[in-house]
Amino acid sequence: MWPKIRNVIIILFTAACWVAGIWYGYQILWREAGRGQTLWYLLWAVVIGAVVMLLAGAWVLYNLRLARRMAGRRKQAVERDVNREQDVMGRRIIAEQPWETLIGQPVVEIRVAGNEKRYLTGGAR
């Protein structure tokens, strides 16, 4: 319920801001500045601003559609082969316990010394 009310409030506030902006623009252009060169400059500024807003809105809608379309493809992590013999730097990996046990541990200490990387349970010192 609240998101619907919030959306209505945002739409009404935005519409009120647009009405106020148009009203004050009218007051400035036709009552004080006259109908000279200022009108054309402001008209071009409004047109360019509208085009920029439309392009930005189209970009947002495109990204939303893309995210929704791709969301089904990213439901799980990518599976890959895990090399537990050495890491990407070429160091030999030594596990104190079997990997299944280490995966379940709340704390795993990793010590790197020379060309070895040791995985120890959290309490090992």
Image: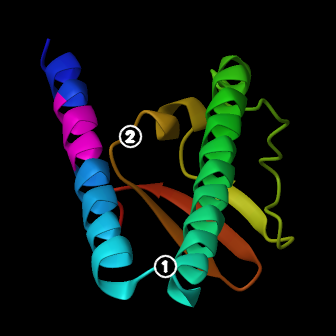
Question: On residue 35, which mark appears?
Answer: 1
Q: Name the residue under label 2.
A: 105
Instruction: State the residue in front, 23 or 71.
Output: 23
| Residue type (three-letter) at the residue carrying disc 2 | Gln
| Main secondary structure type of the part rendered in magenta | helix
Instruction: State the residue in front, 22 or 76.
Output: 22
**Quadrant of the image occupied by residue 78:** top right
Within-10-Å neighbours for mark 1: few <14, some 14–19, many 20+: few
Instruction: State the residue in front, 80 or 32.
Output: 32
- Asked if the stretch drawn in magenta spans residue 15, the answer is yes
Within-10-Å neighbours for mark 2: few <14, some 14–19, many 20+: few
Question: Residue, x 21% and y 22% (percent of image)?
Answer: 3
So how many labels did they put on this image?
A: 2
Residue 20, compared with residue 13, is above or below; it is: below
Between discs 1 and 2, the one toward the N terminus: 1
Q: Can residue 123 be seen in this view?
A: no
For the N terminus, the image quarter is top left
Residue 92 % position (x, y): 79, 65
Question: Residue, x 53% and y 86% (percent of image)?
Answer: 36
The boundaries of the magenta stretch are: 9-16
Residue 13 % position (x, y): 19, 43
Residue 15, compared with residue 111, is above or below; it is: above
Question: Residue, x 34% and y 56% (percent of image)?
Answer: 122
For the C terminus, the image quarter is bottom left
Question: Residue, x 34% and y 68% (percent of image)?
Answer: 25
Residue 29 % position (x, y): 38, 75
Residue 55 % position (x, y): 69, 52
